Image: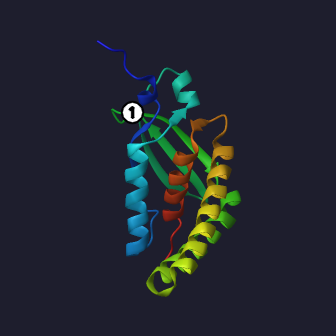
Amino acid sequence: MAAPDPSDKFRIAHIALDEDTILWRNADIEQERRVAIYDLIEDNVFKPIRSVEKGHAGPFRLKLAVMDGRLAMEISTAESEVVETLILGLARFRRPIREYFAICDSYYQAIRKATPAEIETIDMARRGVHNNAAELLMERLEGKIETDFATARRLFTLICVLHIKG
């Protein structure tokens, strides 16, 4: 029998967003949420360092919530045993979140009436904002959670979903 792939241990197998945090969604945002969760579950790298050092193995369950202006990342085992809750201040994310909302709004409007060249220009700007925010998230998780760039991008999308207000 082959040894289990160690990379399969250090991943998110289930993700949930605190529904009480999400105040409002439209169809575009709901689609972004669904795609981010699907892509995240399909392919991610997630190794909570303190939990692993304490002997907890993945794959992990992750619940994201915003409480008192901070991001709460509740990390559980596959059996739903909470092993750690990581709290990150969101002050440094305020601007990237605002920029991402603004560029996404422009993108969704452009899809409906702009030329392909205009849509591509806006999409490039959207990817740039998203990439910069993912790098910031990786920086903030350094020493706490080992992850890759693609996982950080998808997590940032979900953090944005938690900040939508009607």
The quadrant of the picture occupied by the N terminus is top left
x and y percentages locating residue 72 in the rendered image: 54, 49
Tag count? 1
Residue 25 in view, yes or no: no
Above or below, 80 against 115 in this view is above
Looking at the image, which residue is at 53% across and 66% down? 163
Q: Residue at x 53, y 22 (%)?
A: 54
Write down the quadrant of residue 4 in the picture: top left
In the rendered image, the residue lying farthest to the top is 1
**Residue lying at the far bottom of the rendered structure:** 113
Q: Mark 1: few, some, or many residues within 10 Å (few <14, many ≥20)?
A: few
Q: What residue type is disc 1 on?
A: Glu
Question: Which picture quadrant has residue 60?
Answer: top left
Q: Nearer the viewer, residue 136 or 18?
A: 136
At horizontal 51% and vertical 74% (from top left) the residue drawn is 165
Colour scheme: rainbow
**Rendered view: 60 above or below 97:** above
Element on which disc 1 rests: loop
Horizontal side of residue 13 vs 142, given as left or right: left
The correct choice, above or below, for 66 with respect to 148 in the image is below
Q: Does any portion of residue 91 appear in the rendered image?
A: yes
- Residues 42 and 51: in front is 42
Outermost left residue? 1
Q: Relative to the observer, which residue lies in front, 98 or 4? A: 4
In this rendering, is residue 165 above or below 59? below
**What is the x, y in percent for residue 141?**
63, 42
Q: Which residue is mark 1?
A: 81
Quick check: 55 left or right of 1? right
